[in-house]
């Protein structure tokens, strides 16, 4: 099977940062601007190195925001490199499109659900203009996740969202659900920290869950799914009773878990399987 169990982890882009930057400014016609931009290529490359080191060691909050690039290029000019050089320009756009195409089935790696529509700057370009077109700072995301994250500097290692190129949170079970045993059936999702996780990783996952409002997103999707299986479960229950319904839901949970350990579907079907109330007719 080509699809792995990992939902949010993405392969880190291996593009040469200097070449990406040059591609993004290749269409610029103003000679003065282009020559100033070319001269800060080394600063962009060095900012990318610092970013990768910090992202790999949970120290992104220690990077100091910048107002310009080495006093040579302004913040606004760097924002234009992103907008006009990467989003619009044909050479830069190739890199943009390649990054956008990273996630399996075009699903947003931040919520695991939405369609990828844009690139989200993990560290905001308004505070870190040198990282405006650095691939490792650009995460393919859905519009909702892109909007949910404020343009703020992470205040500490704990208050940083999960970065799909650097963090792997998919090998341990952390997403759980419980059934609200009343009609219509509701599902509540929550994070339960695995025993082997350290404090920083635990708090970051909780911060990520809260920032992207994953609890309400998953509850709404689960409500839809529950309406969709009601008729089938009613038929099944009339033939097999409690045991048949429970076994069916358990098979659904296993099937989902084989693809994604921490998907809302896996968590929901497990919770439904474990609810005596639901399996004995609560779904009606
Ligand atoms: Zn999303």
Image (cartoon, rainbow, N blue to C red):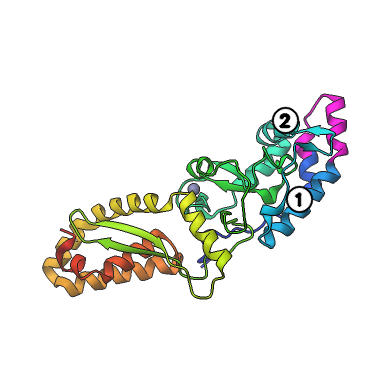
Q: Which is more N-terminal, label 1 or label 2?
A: 1
Which disc, if any, is residue 48?
1
According to the image, label 2 marks what residue?
A: 76
Q: Secondary structure at mark 2?
A: helix
Magenta: main secondary structure equals helix
Quarter of the image for residue 78 reads: top right
Q: Is mark 2 within 8 Å of ligand 1?
A: no
Percent coordinates x, y for residue 210 in the rendering: 46, 52
Bounds of the magenta segment: 23-40
Which residue is at the far front?
155
Work out which quarter of the rendered image holds the C terminus and state it.
bottom left
Q: Residues within 10 Å of mark 2 (few under 14, many from 20)?
A: some
20 vs 201, nearest the viewer:
201
Query: Is residue 83 shown above or below 124?
Result: above
Q: Is residue 63 magenta?
A: no
The picture places residue 127, in percent across and down from the top left corner, at 68, 40
* Farthest residue, direction left: 238
Give the answer, above or below, for where 154 lies relative to 173: above
Say the numbered circle drawn on residue 247.
none
Say if mark 2 contacts mark 1, CB within 8 Å. Answer: no
| Distance from Cα at disc 2 to Cα at disc 1 | 19 Å
* Residue drawn where x is 51% and y is 40% of the image: 147
The count of marks equals: 2
Please identify the quarter of the rendering in which residue 239 is found: bottom left
Q: Secondary structure at mark 1?
A: helix
Percent x, y of residue 23: 77, 39
Asked if residue 226 can be seen in this view, the reply is yes
Q: Nearer the viewer, residue 85 or 232?
A: 85
């Amino acid at each position: 099977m080509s699809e792995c169990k990992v939902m949010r982890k993405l392969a880190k882009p291996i593009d040469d940062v200097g070449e990406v930057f040059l591609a993004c400014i290749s269409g610029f016609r103003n000679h003065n601007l282009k020559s100033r931009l070319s001269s800060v290529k080394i600063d962009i490359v060095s900012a990318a190195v610092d970013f990768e080191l910090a992202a790999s060691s949970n120290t992104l909050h220690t990077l100091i925001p910048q107002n310009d690039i080495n006093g040579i290029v302004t913040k606004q000019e760097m924002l234009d490199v992103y907008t006009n050089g990467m989003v619009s320009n044909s050479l830069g756009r190739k890199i943009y499109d390649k990054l956008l195409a990273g996630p399996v089935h075009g699903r947003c790696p931040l919520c695991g659900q939405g369609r990828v529509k844009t690139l989200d700057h993990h560290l905001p370009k308004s505070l870190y203009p040198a990282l405006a077109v650095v691939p490792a700072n650009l995460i393919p995301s859905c519009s909702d996740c892109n909007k949910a994250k404020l343009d703020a500097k992470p205040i500490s290692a704990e208050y940083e969202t999960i970065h799909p190129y650097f963090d792997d949170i998919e090998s341990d079970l952390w997403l759980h659900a419980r059934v609200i045993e009343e009609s219509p059936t509701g599902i509540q999702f929550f994070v339960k920290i695995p025993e082997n996780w350290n404090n920083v990783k635990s708090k970051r996952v909780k911060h990520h869950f809260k920032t992207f409002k994953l609890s309400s997103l998953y509850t709404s999707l689960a409500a839809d799914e529950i309406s969709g299986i009601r008729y089938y479960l009613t038929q099944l229950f009339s033939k097999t009773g409690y045991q048949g319904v429970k076994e069916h839901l358990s098979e659904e949970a296993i099937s989902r878990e084989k693809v994604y350990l921490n998907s809302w579907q896996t968590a929901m079907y497990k919770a439904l399987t474990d609810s005596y109330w639901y399996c004995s007719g609560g779904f009606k």
